[in-house]
Image: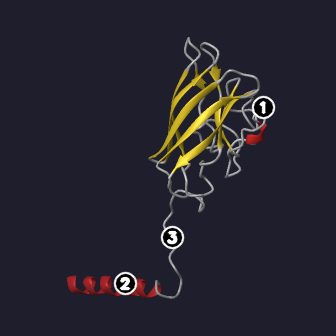
Amino acid sequence: MHRRHHLLAVAAACALAACSTTGEKAAPPMSSPTPASQGTSTASSATVNLASASGSLVSGKLSMAPMGDGVHITGQIGGLGAGQTHAIHVHEKGDCSAADASSAGGHFNPTGSAHGRAGTPTHHAGDMDNIVANAEGVADINIHLSGVTLGGGAANDIAGRAVIVHAAPDDYTSQPSGNAGARVACGVINAAM
């Protein structure tokens, strides 16, 4: 009896194996959706020299480096109001030539998403959390921007784009830019290869 069950099990396994070779391909394993255009950072670092815009006195210097799933940003921004909160974003064009920094275009948004808060399911690739100035009007920057690369030319590459500091905080909901107000500083992301 035991031998009969064993033979039936072997026959069933062979029949199943034969069914799987009928030309139909098995479905690929499910994975998290990742845009085909995402790449890998090729730059080791980048600097951003923020210059005032819209008649402000805001300026600063940022350093960027690839880290984990994105790019880490550190530095300082001064000339802000004491204790005030300001929006900061990566914008689509590395052009700060206009007096109001409008030449930098809109938020960096290669996936066509709605504006929102970084770390939530719906947001622009260039969306970051607000920064807060200390009593001297200086904001210490320590931000991780997920889902982007530095160099390499992929759709999610931020090298050569601009960082903009806004006059007001981002409300994280108003479209298309969080009701963040005037652009008070602009700097191009200059990558080091």
Q: Which mark is residue 100?
A: 1
In the image, what residue occupies the spot 55% across and 53% down?
Answer: 151
Which residue is the site of mark 3? 28
Q: Secondary structure at mark 3?
A: loop
The mark found on residue 12 in the picture is: 2
Q: Residues within 10 Å of mark 2 (few under 14, many from 20)?
A: few
Residue 45 position, x and y percent, is 49, 45
Residue lying farthest left?
2
Q: Nearer the viewer, mark 1 or mark 2?
A: 1
Most foreground residue, 153 or 38: 153
The amino acid type of the residue labelled 2 equals Ala
Measure the alpha-carbon separation of dots 1 and 2.
73 Å
Sequence-wise first label, 1 or 3: 3
Residue 111 visible in the picture: yes
Q: Is residue 144 left or right of residue 181?
A: left
Q: x, y percentage for residue 89?
A: 64, 36
Q: What amino acid is found at the position of numbered circle 3 in the picture? A: Pro
Neighbourhood count class around disc 3 (C-alpha, 10 Å): few under 14, some 14–19, many 20 upward: few
Which disc number belongs to residue 89? none
Question: The residue under label 1 is which amino acid type?
Answer: Asp
Measured as percent of width and height from the top left, residue 148 is found at: 56, 48
Left or right side of 21 for 160: right
